[in-house]
Image (tube, rainbow, N blue to C red):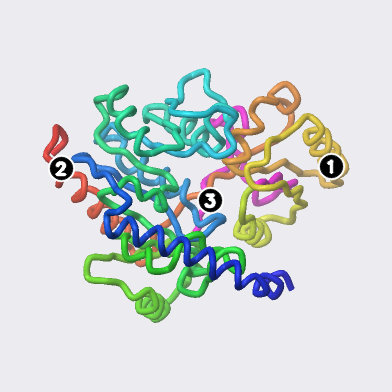
Amino acid sequence: MLRSFRYLLWPISFLYGFIIKLRNWLFDKQILKSSSFNFPIICVGNLATGGTGKTPMTELLIGMLREKYKVATISRGYKRKTKGFAIADETSTALDIGDEPMQLHLKFPGATIAVGEERLVAVPQLLHDRPETDVIILDDAFQHRSINAGLNILLTDYNNLYTRDFMLPAGDLRDVRSSACRAQIIIVTKCPSDISGEDKKKISKELKLSENQQVFFTEIAYAPAHHLFDRFQKTDITGAHSLLICGIANPKPLQEFLTDHTPGFDMIRFGDHHIFKIDDLHDIIKSFNKLEFPNKIILTTEKDAVRLTKYETELRDLPIYVLPMVHRFLFSEADKFHHLIEEFIKTFNNKIA
């Protein structure tokens, strides 16, 4: 029903698509300028709104590179209460830098996590403040054409490929399909674990890859759940009824996972990037206490967790656990992906070559 209603918005989508095409044309003709850096910059992005797994992909890259390189990330810091460029430190909160950068900061204390609306300003500022940096990952920056990243990784949801989607507001695309040609790597995320080789070939053909493009396929996997306030305190969620606290764009994969792997769950859903208030906590605790199950827990996502940690006094004694989401490469191609990233970094004539 909702999708049918969105089709009525085609005139607006046509106008929006025209504006985006014009903007891209101005960049392609260098009427609007893009800047390049003699430095390895990796951009992770997508063409659509909503969750395709950009932050987990950024986490995967950090985890892959951090033992060998000094890694930094730059994000916009969506819904933060501050402006301008900033580097996360021990005093930073989700309100200061945004929930997703805060998630990265907590998970990878050795990495430099920065925020800045203007990536073109943020990159040289970061290199000035952290000159030891070896590689920069731009999180959700595919549409920011003022910077010409050396390597673009484009994500698309298996269940809503950009080739089958439409421009906003009739569809979910915020950029035109033809922009995919700027990506060197395209990753089809949230695939079924049993996707066949034939499906892989069909989708690869549908994406109309050029000779300089590589495509990979990943599924969603979940790491062991840990307590909100103690990462070393793990729990097995498979025997517990969960109260799921969820404020992410697309909770469907998580709901499906809980349906398949736990006795059951209730859910309190909030908007994407929701800033939790004390009244929300009261509702959560009240709902949890009403659950009549001998083995029950509160479960939330990593992105929601960073916005809940400020309520340690209220939540510390509750069985509230965080379920990390990760990308898992299919068709045994994780090493191939890793090799492409390594080769890209090595092309730069700097101290890490």
Which quadrant of the view contains residue 110? top left
The answer to whether residue 205 is left or right of residue 91 is left
Q: Is residue 228 magenta?
A: yes
Number of the label disc, if any, that sits on residue 348: 2
Q: Is residue 351 magenta?
A: no
The answer to whether residue 86 is left or right of residue 32 is right
Q: Nearer the viewer, residue 12 or 228?
A: 12
Please give the range of residues in magenta.
Answer: 220-247
Label 1's element? helix
Number of the label disc, if any, that sits on residue 287: 1
- Residue beneath disc 3: 222
Which quadrant of the view contains residue 281? top right
Callout 1 crowding tier (Cα within 10 Å): few <14, some 14–19, many ≥20 = some
Residue at the (61%, 64%) spot, across then down: 169
Q: Position of residue 35 (x, y in %)?
A: 27, 44
Label 3's element? strand
Q: Amino acid at mark 3?
A: Tyr
Q: In front of the other: label 2 or label 1?
A: 2
Tell which circle, 1 or 3, labels the residue nearer the N-terminal end: 3
Q: Nearer the viewer, residue 310 or 4?
A: 4
Residue at the (37%, 29%) spot, across then down: 112
Magenta span: predominant SS is strand
Tell which circle, 2 or 1, labels the residue nearer the N-terminal end: 1
Q: Position of residue 353 (x, y in %)?
A: 13, 39
